[in-house]
Image (tube, grey):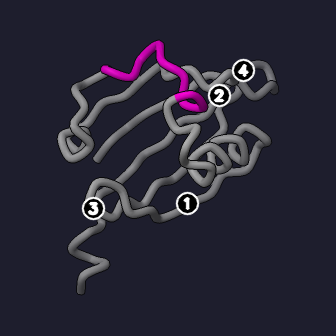
């Protein structure tokens, strides 16, 4: 599992979980870095975060670093305004293989 969040500008505010090892990342290594810049060569990843920033809550599956991850994206709110996106990514590689 990986739990992560970005603010409304796409800056990571959280990046934790055992699944980070599959991505070659350490706990909170992405905090302070911009999602849109890091994933600029992956338009699908950028589009998913932008979709959540528009207020939609949804799930999507993606193949990343030889693993399948199912991610649930949720907009975060403060006083009725969207302030960012929180997400939970779960490794579903074995499920997909079955």
Q: Relative to residue 17, is residue 73 depicted above or below?
A: below
Residue density around tag 2, few if under 14, some if 14–19, many if 20 or more, within 10 Å: many
Q: Residue at x 60, y 32 (%)?
A: 36
Q: In the shown orientation, is residue 78 left or right of residue 88?
A: right
Q: Quadrant of residue 17?
A: top left
Distance between mark 4 and mark 2 Cα atoms: 9 Å
Q: Is residue 30 shown in magenta?
A: yes
Distance of label 4 from label 1 (alpha carbons): 22 Å
Quarter-of-image position of residue 82: top right
* Closer to the eye: label 4 or 2: 2
The residue segment tinted magenta is 29-37
Q: Which residue carries the number 4 mark?
A: 78
- The residue that disc 3 covers is 67
User: Which comes sooner in the sequence, label 1 or label 3?
Assistant: 1
Nearer the N terminus, badge 2 or badge 1? 1
Magenta region, main secondary structure: loop
């Amino acid at each position: 599992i990986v739990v992560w969040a970005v603010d409304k500008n796409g800056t990571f505010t959280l990046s934790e979980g055992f699944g980070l090892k599959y991505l070659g990342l350490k706990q909170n290594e992405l905090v302070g870095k911009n999602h849109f810049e890091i994933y600029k060569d992956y338009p699908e990843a950028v589009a998913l975060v932008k979709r959540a920033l528009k207020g939609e809550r949804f799930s999507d599956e993606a193949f990343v670093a030889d693993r399948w991850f199912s991610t649930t994206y949720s907009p975060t709110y403060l006083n009725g305004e969207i302030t960012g996106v929180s997400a939970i990514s779960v490794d579903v590689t074995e499920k997909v293989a079955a």
